[in-house]
Image (cartoon, rainbow, N blue to C red):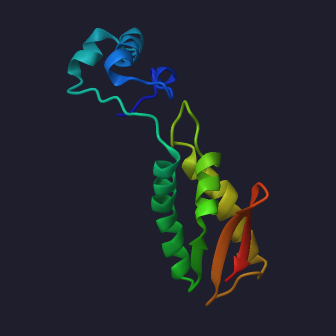
Amino acid sequence: MTSNIGSQFITEEWRRDKDSSLVMDSLRQHFRPEFLNRVDEIIIFDRLVEEELKQIVEIQLKRLIRRLESQKITLELSEAAKAFVARQGHDPVYGARPLKRAIQKSILDPLSLDILEGKFREGQTIRVDALNGSLSFNTA
């Protein structure tokens, strides 16, 4: 089980040795002692940085890339596009959970429409890049 309880305390200035007690206090306020007593271990994760978010974007995109490969379409994302999606899908409170929705909204939905409209076809390579605050889709 994962939870974002106490995540408001994990900021840029987070110091595990000093501030983890704030997170634990939040857990104790939220959950009954009977429940916490049954939890084997509580792990407090550090806030995700952009490079880690880009890696999560790559992992999430592998499914889409495989689906497109079955249609003989190749998908390539620039580092700027990965960073764009990582920023769109990151929330300081929820971490990387919104990333899947950001990928769907910013890549999957527009790309699906372009394929249905015939803009991209079998055998093509689609290059995704970030320009002027949005993503662009072009053949490579």
Report the label total.
0
Q: Which percent across, then down, holds residue 100? A: 55, 51
Residue 63's spot in the image, x, y percent?
48, 66
Decide: is 116 above or below 6.
below
Determine the residue positioned at 47% across, 40% down.
48
Vertical side of 102 occupied by 91: above or below: above
43 vs 59, left or right, is left
Residue drawn at (52%, 57%), measured in percent from left and top?
57
Q: Quadrant of residue 28?
A: top left
Q: Position of residue 81 (x, y in %)?
A: 64, 61
Q: Nearer the viewer, residue 115 or 59?
A: 59
Near-viewer residue (6 or 110):
6
Q: From the viewer's perspective, tell me whether residue 52 is left or right of residue 133.
A: left
The image shows residue 128, relative to residue 104, as above or below, that is below
Q: Position of residue 92 (x, y in %)?
A: 56, 33
The quadrant the C terminus occupies is bottom right
Left or right of 35 in this view: 53: right
The residue sitting at 47% across, 54% down in the picture is 56
Apparent side of residue 47 relative to residue 25 in the rendered image (left or right): right
Q: Residue at x 58, y 37 (%)?
A: 91
| The N terminus lies in quadrant | top left
Which quadrant of the view contains residue 126? bottom right
